[in-house]
Amino acid sequence: MLSEVDDYMASIDYNITTFNGFAILQMDALNARGETSSDILINLFKGYLAAPNKEFNMYIKQMKNEYKEGQDLSEDDIMVMAGTNTRCL
């Protein structure tokens, strides 16, 4: 469930690739049922911020702030950007 992503992130030892795969499966399941969720981005940020690495967290917080300031970011954009910055984990 997307609302418990921080717990899930810890359970997979903060593996961003696995986390992104999980998020995609959850979004696909919603789409298959004809449902949507307005809090997917919020939950993605929540999951990423559960990672204990300070440098990665700073990057995610910056991305979150840019989103809040109006930058057009999709779920896919955020997952790609987080996935390409796993070097600091």
Image (spheres, helix red, strand yellow):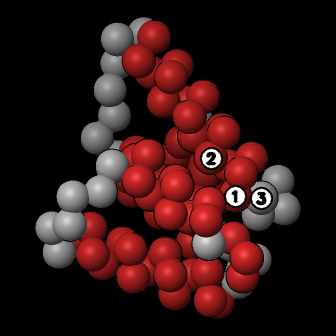
Dot 3: what SS?
Answer: loop
Dot 2: what SS?
Answer: helix
Label 1: few (<14), some (14–19) or many (≥20) C-alpha neighbours in 10 Å: many
On screen, residue 57 above or below 19 = below
Residue 7 x/y as whole percent:
70, 56
Q: Which residue is mark 1?
A: 16
Q: Separation of disc 2 and disc 3 at Cα? A: 9 Å
Dot 1: what SS?
Answer: helix
Residue at screen point 71% across, 51% down: 17
Residue 82 quadrant: bottom right
Residue 51 quadrant: bottom right
Q: In the drawing, does residue 43 fall left or right of residue 73?
A: right
* Residue type marked 3: Asn
Q: Are marks 3 and 1 in contact (CB under 8 Å)?
A: yes
Q: Are marks 2 and 3 in contact (CB under 8 Å)?
A: no
> Quadrant location of the C terminus?
bottom right
> Quadrant location of the N terminus?
top right
Residue at screen point 77% across, 58% down: 15
Residue 74 x/y as whole percent:
33, 49
Instruction: Report the label total.
Output: 3
Q: Separation of disc 3 and disc 1 at Cα? A: 4 Å
Task: Tell me if I can see residue 9 in this picture.
Answer: no
Residue 49: numbered disc: none
Q: Which residue is mark 2?
A: 20
Residue at the top extreme, as displayed:
33
Residue 38 quadrant: top left
Q: Which residue is mark 3?
A: 15
* Residue type marked 2: Asn
